Image (cartoon, rainbow, N blue to C red):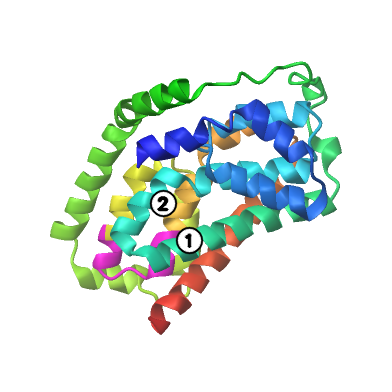
Amino acid sequence: MIFIISYIQSYFPPERSRQVIGQYKGLKALILAALLGTITPFCSCSSIPLFIGFVSAGLPLGVVFSFLISSPLVDLGSIVLLSSMFGLNITLIYVVLGLVLAILGGLLIDKLKMEKYIASFKTYNQYANNDIATLSKKERINFAKAQPMQVLKKVYLYIFIGVAIGVLIHNYIPQNYISMVLGSDKLFAVPLAAALGAPMYADIFGVIPIAESLYLKGAGLGTVMAFMMAVTALSLPSIIILKQVVKGRLLFTFISIVIIGIIISGYIFNYIDKLI
């Protein structure tokens, strides 16, 4: 799966993504930015340099924020792992909610006209004269072949830590404790999960095993999904980095939109969980 995903990603380097998005305006551009975010394998921190480059290249602020939300939140590799643990239906709902959050978040920021809250020294167009390297089919295949081991080296520690925490939750924390605090019938559980997850920095590959263990122990589906989405979309290091290129009001708006969207998504998951 990593090979296939990497082959697809070889067609969308940052420069090409910028050029593709730049051909559209309005809602179409927001949707396209969110979709392109799903095939760019970046965490919340590594998305920031792309954010800077896209803003510098003159892309609309709302479009860039749609990409910034979608890129870490809806990752193709994590979708594969998520479907293996929670099933295809839950994964599809996760993808839809993540894309909707990215599109609506970008649309709201666009309507608020917050361009003045971007740091002034980030206005140069660093991509204006960049040529996009065209890879041959053989080069794309070689690139895709190299990715599985590189991805494994990058995420194996997160996976081991996530599985270890999941084992501790599964074997040592009584089910009634988790249900009492994080059960789907507890109204405060989803906001609590989002608030606890937002400052954390972890790879989504490490968060998914923890989410699965919490769910099997009685935590509400919406609670574990809100926790996972918050850890993935926001993190204290990424917020600190983003603070260097945007002013406080825009940063607060971005964080508020994402947190509120995650909480709403969590309640939707809880409702769906009761239906199924």
Q: In the drawing, what numbered circle is on residue 79?
A: 2
x and y percentages locating residue 79 in the rendered image: 41, 51
Q: Vertically, is 68 above or below 240?
A: below
Q: Which residues are magenta?
A: 213-225
Q: Read off the residue under disc 1.
A: 94
Which residue is painted at 27% across and 40% down in the image?
Answer: 159
The answer to whether residue 176 of the structure is visible from this angle is yes
Binning the other alpha carbons within 10 Å of mark 2 as few (below 14), some (14 to 19) or many (20 upward) gives many
Which residue is painted at 51% across and 21% down in the image?
Answer: 136
x and y percentages locating residue 276 in the rendered image: 38, 81
Which residue is painted at 82% across and 24% down in the image?
Answer: 123
Mark 2 or 1 closer to N-term?
2
Binning the other alpha carbons within 10 Å of mark 1 as few (below 14), some (14 to 19) or many (20 upward) gives many
Q: Amino acid at mark 1?
A: Tyr
Q: Amino acid at mark 2?
A: Ile
**Left or right, residue 22 beside residue 157:** right
Q: Quadrant of the N terminus?
A: top left
Which residue is painted at 46% across and 20% down in the image?
Answer: 139
x and y percentages locating residue 167 in the rendered image: 17, 52
Name the image quarter holding residue 204: top left
Whether residue 224 appears in magenta in the rendering, the answer is yes
Q: For the stretch drawn in magenta, what is the main secondary structure?
A: helix
The answer to whether residue 198 of the structure is visible from this angle is no
**Left or right, residue 34 beside residue 119:** left
x and y percentages locating residue 94 in the rendered image: 48, 61
